[in-house]
Amino acid sequence: MADTERRAAGTPHVVIVGGGFAGLWATRALARDAVRITLVDRRNHHLFQPLLYQVATAGLSAPDIAAPLRHILRRQRNVEVMLAEVEAIHADRRELGLAGGRTLAYDVLLLASGSTHAYFGHEEWEQVAPGLKTLADALKIRQQVLLAFEKAEQAADPAERAAWLDFAVIGGGPTGVELAGTLAEIARHTLRDEFRHVDPSTARVRLIEAGPRVLASFPESLSIKARQQLERLGVDVVTGTPVSEINADGYRLGETFVRARTVLWAAGVAASPLGRLLQAPTDRAGRVQVAADLSVPGHPEILVAGDLASVQQPDGTPVPGIAPAAKQMGRHAARVIRARLRGQPAPAFRYRDFGNLATIGRMAAVVDLRALRLSGALAWWFWLIAHVFFLIGFRNRLSVLINWASSYWSYQRHARIILEQPGDEPVEIDPPASHDATPPARRGLPST
Amino acid sequence: MADTERRAAGTPHVVIVGGGFAGLWATRALARDAVRITLVDRRNHHLFQPLLYQVATAGLSAPDIAAPLRHILRRQRNVEVMLAEVEAIHADRRELGLAGGRTLAYDVLLLASGSTHAYFGHEEWEQVAPGLKTLADALKIRQQVLLAFEKAEQAADPAERAAWLDFAVIGGGPTGVELAGTLAEIARHTLRDEFRHVDPSTARVRLIEAGPRVLASFPESLSIKARQQLERLGVDVVTGTPVSEINADGYRLGETFVRARTVLWAAGVAASPLGRLLQAPTDRAGRVQVAADLSVPGHPEILVAGDLASVQQPDGTPVPGIAPAAKQMGRHAARVIRARLRGQPAPAFRYRDFGNLATIGRMAAVVDLRALRLSGALAWWFWLIAHVFFLIGFRNRLSVLINWASSYWSYQRHARIILEQPGDEPVEIDPPASHDATPPARRGLPST
């Protein structure tokens, strides 16, 4: 890459790492500026993360909620999209180290690499309790959930069968609530009549939250409504009790060990590891503590936006890690870059809070617009319209709407496809495995 | 599985292996019969194979062309769907051996496990030239094709860049023609404006057929039309020259070694290995030579249908390995099973030939209805309507139609998603690999 030439040529080179909401919105906001932008992402697509749980639960297919970054940006001539992984940040010489030994020099750097799931020191749980951040995660969870019912159908031992029909979602935030509500719908409605040896509607779907209530970022009245709606959908909601152990056989809740073959993790996020590479101060979750203009203290040429940034609002509360906040930060970072390049003072970021919404299941959601709180069917319609409206690209929106309308009327979920394992092997129903090395999607089932 | 009880109970147990066109149509045709059916498949879905190339070329998503077998058959109470792999056929004691050491007894067995790709003794080519038979194959090819353009964009060496922009499809049958036509469209239209260092429309898409003409199963006049249409789409068609070598660097065509990073295999099919397990006479492609009623000579209780069966028509030509023939055989097998169980003589199978059609690309296809031969736009519309009409399930049809309408107007292909590699690693741009062990999707690119 002829970066030295570029720098010499005088057009400032802006490198943006991450094509999520923050990075993509910053890139677009710089469309008319006299800069050269390189958008670096290790994936080729922008992901509409708020609907990722629908891919995990077989309601939508992966391409429904993802669009190639190159395609989104094809007409923006000052951008080059680069499929690469950042491995080092050399702030002293304004250079990124990429996987494969390549380097990429920048004049201005925007880090927007987002967040990943965190296991709070129990990293071994990742093998048995997958989290949901990427399309690959979603497809893995989809596979695991669909296989659990297949394995229950084939289990000869009643205790083993029950363990395959026991689903736990750990973490009562929006992702946990969405997953639990949808799993309950799959068990109670979607799979009706399809099995001959088990009744999927007898499956237990349990949502476990260590804190006192689900959806803790919402007002307490909406947490209560959310719990009621979850219970109506058939979810067993447990609050105030932490999970102290997870393995391939199940999980420990308080003192009791519960046999369950499917445990999903929605209990925590941590910032992308790129924050640590910066060697700037970070908060407990690994987010970079940025100045009011989103720049890294001591490095005005490095900005951080989105889930990777730790930003305080004037009232002392942190800006939440949600898509609207990431878009606002991305747009603001573009303004700061513009000001920097013109030698003007950079404005401070101010988060505009438009409210908070979470979906629970069929006709069940909560919406907190500060002045207005909704729950139930009305909140669900509000959530649906907002999410379809914000999906990138007209085609995806239409396809998602059709899939939803069809799912809604039929209770069906069209993406219930179990793919073969990599290497062209078929999905196997294995002999029982121990709980250490085997990934959960291939966990065991006794031969009958 | 309480198979001995079942057999004792008197309701005949029909085991059908394979949920493709033959197996599924046979299962459905037995819906009102007093039999217990177990449909065994190692995948959870029926696949609409005629549109698989659209998944490989990112036009459709996997769930668009697949539906869970359980769901299709949920209301047919005499069927149990079993996700399992058959490893042995013990015809003497009427029992199948399944993976994991389980067994499954039958009174009547229908084998309909289809076909797989064949490399004619060059099995090592499978690593570097993937074939297209399953959804996993299609997703692998999609990944490889999309990554090839990414790698070309990053290649520093012009020869290396050219090798990433060189695509070869080996085999001029319907699958090869579809793949080559669609790849040319992707290179020439879909990726327009998206890259900054390469021009995808300079990519070479070559279709190589060892025989004298493409679409050899069609009348010669339509082969000529097909070739003209391919060339108009930008495909370099080479006939009469076999490929004698394929490795990760390219392929040898006649005397010349051509550097190409993407070689796709559409040159041959062989019957599923289950045919060999039967120890009955097979033809060169491994298909079981069945009697006129589709039964295995010496085993009236074992029938074979679909691509696994080798059946002669009265004029001596073989019944072709296409979806309509598989459906007809499946329905016929159901009739034979019914006759057997009533002690009546079994009717002979007669193939009703409704014609032959192949698509080539945008507004390009050939249709041979014996009395009527079409090519070009009219043939394409005929093909489109026929295929959407035959897709299983209303929802899929509508979604496929919308995706196609949208692709048609925009030249876009909505499923251009590169997923991470298994194990949650991002897609890597690796250092160059030797041509033996590394799977093609991860083949190398020099660091720059």
Image (tube, coloured by chain):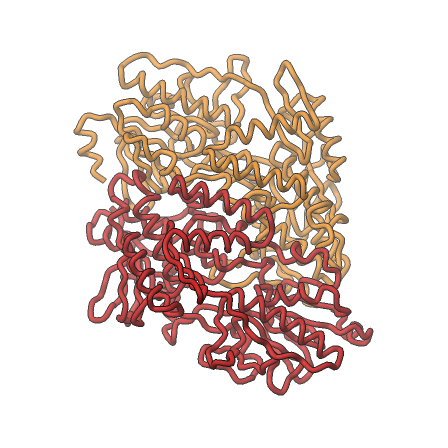
Chain colours: A orange, B red
Apparent side of residue A18 relative to residue A226 in the rendered image (left or right)? left
Relative to A413, does residue B436 appear above or below in the rendering?
below
Residue ID at (33%, 12%): A345
Can residue A131 be seen from the camera position used here? Answer: no
Q: Where is residue B267 shown, x and y percent of the image?
A: 38, 68
x and y percentages locating residue B134 in the rendered image: 49, 60
Which of B278 and B297 lies nearest the eye of the viewer?
Answer: B297
**Vertical comparison of B137 with B240: above or below:** above
**A84 with respect to A415 (left or right):** left
Q: Quadrant of the C terminus of chain A?
A: bottom right
Question: In front: B275, or A370?
Answer: B275
Residue B29 visible: yes
Q: Residue furthest front?
A: B371
Side of A448 relative to A73 (left or right): right
Q: Quadrant of the N terminus of chain A?
A: top left
The residue at the point 24 percent across, 46 percent down is: B448
Does residue A19 sit above or below B377 in this rendering? above
User: How many numbered discs?
Assistant: 0
Picture coordinates of residue A258 (x, y %)? 73, 48
Judged from this view, the residue extending furthest toward the right is: B9
**Percent position (x, y) of residue A227?**
73, 31
| Residue B254 location, quadrant | bottom left
